[in-house]
Amino acid sequence: MVVKQEMRRKYLTIRDSLSEAEVNEKSRLIIKKLTALDIYQKADIILTYIDFRNEVLTTGLVAEILKQKEKRVFCPKVVTKMKDKSFIHLELNAAQRRLMGVGREIAFYEIKALTELAAGYQGIREPVVKDGPAAIHPGDNSAVSINDFLDSESDNCLMIMPGVVFDGQRGRIGYGKGFYDRFLASYPKLKTVALAYEFQIVSSVPKEDNDVCPDMILTELRIIK
């Protein structure tokens, strides 16, 4: 765990030091590789993170998908998961979560425009879910959650995921909360592609039993399968 924390800190510092021009050019090359993939072209539903703090840029990709209207886009939102497995959007502090015996997870919500995103968890842009603290459930008209039907739709879904450090065996170190590992453990058939800069690829990353590897990793220089 300590090794992961040290690697995470080191590579986030390097990533934060990239210039805007470097981020734009490397992201352009990575997104070009992504959109050329057969699994991307065949996907009807794209689950994707929204870039933050010099991550590989996805905002332009999302804008283009929404413009073309050939695919549906779902983006993650950090929510509170209740004991009955329902989600609420009411922000609880750590003490309140411990008292209630609940935790944080990610859920993916459909967006139809970039204006449907707003700063949320740790300042990351997330879908605005209009039902406030009400639980999300199948048939809720105020927000369409991929969690409601992903089991039956996973064959034509593709997840684009972030990360901090990766290796050539598709090992991944994320941001330390386990959001993607837990989400993907529930949907093992979901196809996944991680986006990273080449400097984020190392010889080996520490792996734990609950870590989920992406199906492939795209950098500006190569595709790791």
Image (cartoon, rainbow, N blue to C red):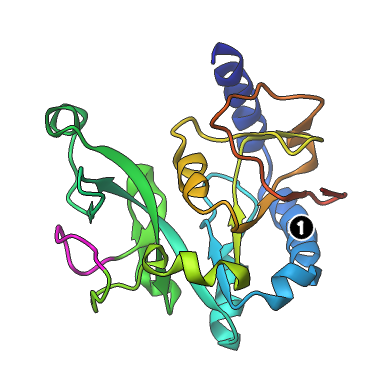
Whole-percent x and y of residue 217? 75, 48
Q: Residues within 10 Å of mark 1 (few under 14, many from 20)?
A: many
Left or right position of 18 against 188 = right
Which structural element holds mark 1?
Answer: helix
Which quadrant, please, contains the N terminus?
top right
Magenta residues, dominant SS class: loop
Is residue 46 or residue 153 the one in the foreground?
153
42 sits left or right of 179 in the view: right
Q: Nearer the viewer, residue 158 or 33?
A: 158
Q: Which residue is mark 1?
A: 30
Residue 133 within the segment the image draws in magenta? yes
Q: How many marks?
A: 1
Name the residue rendered at 43%, 78% in the picture: 113
Residue 35 visible? no
Residue 194, percent from left and from top: 67, 50
Q: Is residue 156 magenta?
A: no
Question: In the displayed image of the protein, which residue is found farthest to the top?
Answer: 2
State the image quarter where residue 36 is shown: bottom right
Q: Position of residue 190 (x, y in %)?
A: 59, 58
Residue 180: image x %, image y %?
50, 44
Residue drawn 60% across and 57% down? 189
* Residue drawn at point x = 53 percent, y = 81 percent: 66
Q: Does residue 198 sit above or below 31 in this rendering?
A: above
Foreground residue among 79 and 198: 79
Identify residue type, mark 1. Answer: Ile
Q: Is residue 77 above or below residue 82?
A: below
The magenta region covers 129-137
Q: Residue furthest right?
A: 221
Left or right: residue 130 compared with residue 73: left
